Image: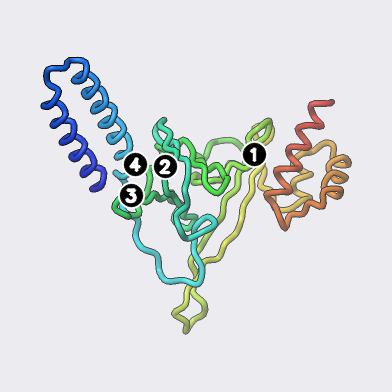
Amino acid sequence: MTKIIIKICLFLSIIFCAGQLFAQNNDTKETIDNVAEQYLDVAERQSVLYYGEIQESHPRTANHPFLKEIQYAKARLSYGGIVYPDEWLRLDWSRNQLVILSPDFSNIVLFPENLDYAEIYGYRIIYFQKDTLQGSPATGYYILLHDEQYKILAKETVLLRKGDTNSTNFDYSKTAHYYLYKDAVYHSIKNKRGLLKALGSHKKELRKFISINRLSFRNAEELLVHTITEYEKILQTD
């Protein structure tokens, strides 16, 4: 926030000086006014990202609770209907928080209700609100792995745990969860058998597809995305 204010002040000083030098030129004045308004509009829209609370620090642990890396990653963010193409984000699974790095290097928690989506590490992150449909997962941040005829949501449950009774060492336990949204029902997918059961039809063709492509639940994301995509193709030919 501090850096934004400094930039605005510096820019306005330049604009003021330019306005004094070219006071007699109405076209120039109009151009300067327009540029100033555009700059202030951008600065104001940018600053709304940093109104959240500062995230508390994490305890020292053997691993971390974030998506992929502990470091911030360059991301594309759509927030409050405005797209910010180059922001630094990290997703904290343990606290269910999407965090942005501010210009003064503070860890600012974004308001989840303002998030349209974030694109980071090639994933699309959404904030899902639990609904009344059968099997609906809990409210929180999810990865939207697939969003065509059917949807696939993924997330991690990350819990802080102590090594043993006498230990001062901590780490995070991580459990991946996958949900298939099909026919107004959310299916929790825990293995290949569960996926085929949730899909219901064309199991023979899908088993053959999985076998030929050597797909396994050890790489659950690949299995889910490729199998669902193939299933949608098969349905189109029915």
- Is there a contact, CB below 8 Å, between mark 3 and mark 4? yes
Residue type, numbered disc 2: Pro
Q: CA distance from mark 1 to mark 4?
A: 27 Å
Residue type, numbered disc 1: His
- Is there a contact, CB below 8 Å, between mark 3 and mark 2? no
How far across and how far down the image is residue 47, in percent? Answer: 29, 40
Residue type, numbered disc 3: Ser
Q: Left of 223 or right of it: where is 57?
A: left
Q: Which residue is mark 1?
A: 146
For the C terminus, the image quarter is top right
* Residue 104 visible to the viewer: yes
Q: Which residue is mark 2?
A: 112
How far across and how far down the image is residue 21, in percent? Answer: 12, 26
- Is there a contact, CB below 8 Å, between mark 1 and mark 3? no
Q: CA distance from mark 4 to mark 2?
A: 11 Å
Q: CA distance from mark 3 to mark 4?
A: 8 Å
Q: CA distance from mark 2 to mark 1?
A: 21 Å
Q: CA distance from mark 1 to mark 3?
A: 30 Å
Give the SS element for disc 1. strand
